[in-house]
Image (spheres, grey):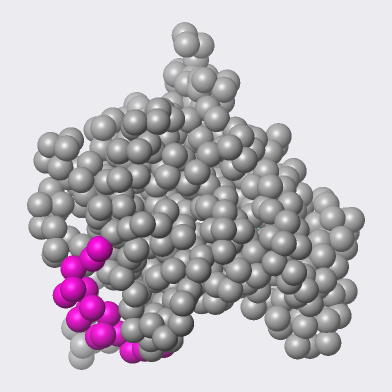
Amino acid sequence: MSEKAQLIIEGKTIELPIVMGTENEKAIDISSLRGSTGYITIDPGYKNTGATSSAITFLDGEKGILRYRGYSIEDLAEKSSFLEVSYLLIYGELPNKPELEAFQKEITHHTLIHEDIKNILEGFPSNSHPMGVLSSLVSSLTAFYPESLDPNRSADEVDLSIKRLLAKIPTMAAWAFKNEIGHPANYPDNALNYCSNFLKMMFSVPSEKYDVDPVIANALDKLLILHADHEQNCSTSTVRIVGSSHASLYASIAAGISALWGPLHGGANQSVIEMLEGIQADGGDVKKYMDKAKDKNDSFRLMGFGHRVYKNFDPRATIIKKAADDVLEKLGVNDPILEIAKGLEVIALKDPYFVERKLYPNVDFYSGIIYRAIGIPTSMFTVMFTLGRLPGWIAQWKEMRENKEPIGRPRQVYTGNNLRRFKTVSER
Ligand code: ACO
């Protein structure tokens, strides 16, 4: 595009290239600004900064659109499987039948993890939060596969690291949970599909027969699809920026897991349920908590409401809300927490505070309700998000590497002291 933006600084007019995306997303390329003017731009929280160009995920927060590689999230959630979506995100196209079968076979083949990982697990106190454990275990894969340390190795070797990670993360996640509750870890069952295998490792105990409920496995598969990528969010940007230093895939993903953990990001699903339980324990007065959320002197926020990008509705929330209703009905679950959630939603959608600030339920308002219904403990909610987001992180890491992006290194405006004369201790 030949059009330029003009910026007048200190009486001088600077021309800056305009960049246009395939969905007409417009950006001003300011990469030459400092060199030509000495100025940088300031944008705390990167609310208005495009850190990269990416061909993976498109989202339009105003219109509530989310697409992976051009396919709508609605179609993918209804018609595909999580492994199909993982393939799409990582390799750019939907797999044909032989490609999908080969991919499923390879992922299944690598599900087992090294026995020494058990020693690492045993080193954690038994009530450790599984997100911290998972991040550490993912990082520890660099020790078991030292060749993964160098992301500049051949494409085939990098691909093997990718498949290993996708295959092993359900095992590590389930083992982190077993560690939390002090139960023996279960080995993967390669006769089962991705989600069923995970559920069996999570819930089966040696003394009882465990059959995976297909309703639960399907609901989980859909949830993972909905979380699979979300362009340049906090954890994905973390993965890209860590990877930009040529740190290994496993180190970059371990950092992404830590970024996802926080309650303002992936940790929101855990916080939603804790908030709903708190409201229930306090007598179920929904209005009282709405007032707290609106009170600027009160730090309480309505967890699961609001989103940095979606300012009309979160398309994932629409799909998941319906899925939550279906699952609860099929499983015959009657959860009082759900009534509180519905009560909050009804009030918030009409309340001027929430309407004016465009605060709508996000995906995590409902995901916790489904996880709870299918028996996933609250401390594992953010781990479930991690399982879902993994292919997106991998795809973004791979794209960043293939595009040979430079190391991520923002600038700052310094606001500290000017040069001071050093005083020795006796002078101070
Ligand atoms: N409850 C009450 N007020 C809120 C909420 C909330 N959940 N979210 C935002 N606001 C208010 C803010 O106080 C602010 O009000 P003001 O303009 O009067 O000062 C205004 O809405 C804008 O909020 P910001 O924090 O500036 O919006 P931002 O885009 O930075 O934050 C975020 C987005 C972090 C998601 C925020 O809405 C929030 O904290 N939500 C609750 C946590 C949550 O559900 N996170 C999950 C996000 S989805 C995901 O990561 C998968």
Residue visible at 55% across and 76% down in the picture: 377
Rendered image quadrant of residue 290: bottom right
Q: In the current view of this chain or complex, which residue is farthest to the front?
A: 209
> Quarter holding the C terminus?
bottom left
The x and y percentages for residue 262 are 49, 67
Determine whether, in the image, residue 41 is placed left or right of residue 143.
right
Query: Relative to the observer, which residue lies in front, 25 or 270?
Result: 270
Q: Is residue 116 above or below residue 21?
A: below
User: Is residue 191 within the magenta segment?
Assistant: no
Magenta stretch: give its range. 112-131
Residue visible at 30% across and 85% down in the picture: 124
The x and y percentages for residue 163 are 27, 48
The x and y percentages for residue 259 are 42, 61
Residue visible at 44% across and 69% down in the picture: 200
Q: Is residue 98 above or below residue 276?
A: above
Query: Relative to the observer, which residue lies in front, 389 or 264?
Result: 389
Q: Is residue 117 above or below residue 404?
A: below
Determine whether, in the image, residue 272 is placed left or right of residue 175.
right
Query: Relative to the observer, which residue lies in front, 86 or 101?
Result: 101
